[in-house]
Amino acid sequence: MKVYPLVIFYLFCLNCSSSDNSSYDNSPPNDPDPIGVVQEEVFYISQNIDGSNVSREVLLHLPESFDNTQTYPVVIAFHGNGGQNDGWISRFSHFVDNGEFIGVYPQGYLNSWNLGREASTADDVDFFNQIMAQLETYSFFDASRVYGIGSSNGSAMINKLAIETPHFTAVAALASQLMVGTLPDSSTAAVSVLQICGAADNTIPYEGGMAFMGHHFLGAHESALTWANAFHCNTEPVIEMMGADQILTYIDCDSGKEIKFHSIENGGHNLNAPNDPLFFHRIWDFLKRF
């Protein structure tokens, strides 16, 4: 495997405000941890979109002490509408540099993921399946430890991919619940799901309904219960509180999976992540259990 020279990235926050806005982005929830030298590799997936051959970028984020003789878990992360794939680097550098996983960051066509109302008309399910086929060619890849994270538009895409493909072991859907018409059922491969929603989200309505971008969403609680029903979980959740936040966990699911719903009290579309230094640590703690 070819490893490119070390590159220094200087990132800025694409949406540092704690309030919602109507851009249906937004990039990954901000993590203030600084980054330094980043080791990366890029590969490209060729895809026909609207009659044109498009080369789509996938960024690999590698540990500083990368060892190509061992296998690693991979976290495949999908940015929000209008976002960039390298926005995940600062969020995950702590974990990647410690060798906990390799980050895989695809770039959405026209900076978005196609759910039927976005600028992109790409077949992103096919794109994802091609990414998985490419990862199979890398010596570090462990197909039994594939995790997905998505934010906003990328979160809705994570839900779609978890429903329509069998690749993920566990996923974290940040700031998007399930959409009407894209729901798990008995044919869906069992996957553990962490759903995090802001109770004061004005971009994707917490109680469900039509959002401004034209998608119809389930309510946040209904979404979590839909996942639980699809995998025959115990539908009486374990309830815990984290400060003012409520966390519902559905256990005893098919294949040892679990559905967890973290409702962030007074949380907007950015989930109050800029004020929570352990935000991504808790997400990784959940994912790596499966």
Image (tube, rainbow, N blue to C red):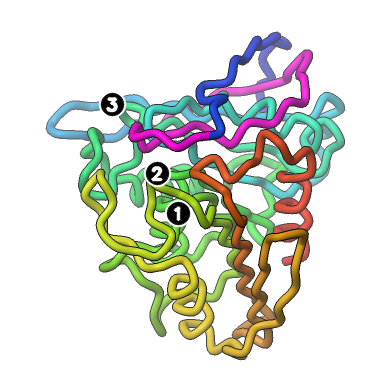
Which numbered tag is attached to residue 54? Answer: 3
Q: Is residue 48 magenta?
A: no
Mark sitting earlier along the chain (2/3)? 3
Q: Are marks 2 and 1 in contact (CB under 8 Å)?
A: yes
Residue drawn where x is 25% and y is 44% of the image: 213
Q: Is residue 32 magenta?
A: yes
> Is 215 above or below relative to 268?
below
The kind of residue on which mark 1 rests is Ser
Residue drawn where x is 78% and y is 38% of the image: 277
> Is 196 above or below relative to 16?
below
Q: Which residue is mark 2?
A: 153
State which region is magenta. Answer: 19-45
Label 1: element kind:
loop
Please indicate whether residue 227 sits to the left or right of residue 191 in the image: left
Q: Which residue is mark 1?
A: 176
The kind of residue on which mark 3 rests is Val
The kind of residue on which mark 2 rests is Asn
Mark sitting earlier along the chain (1/3)? 3
Residue 243: name its quadrant.
Answer: bottom right
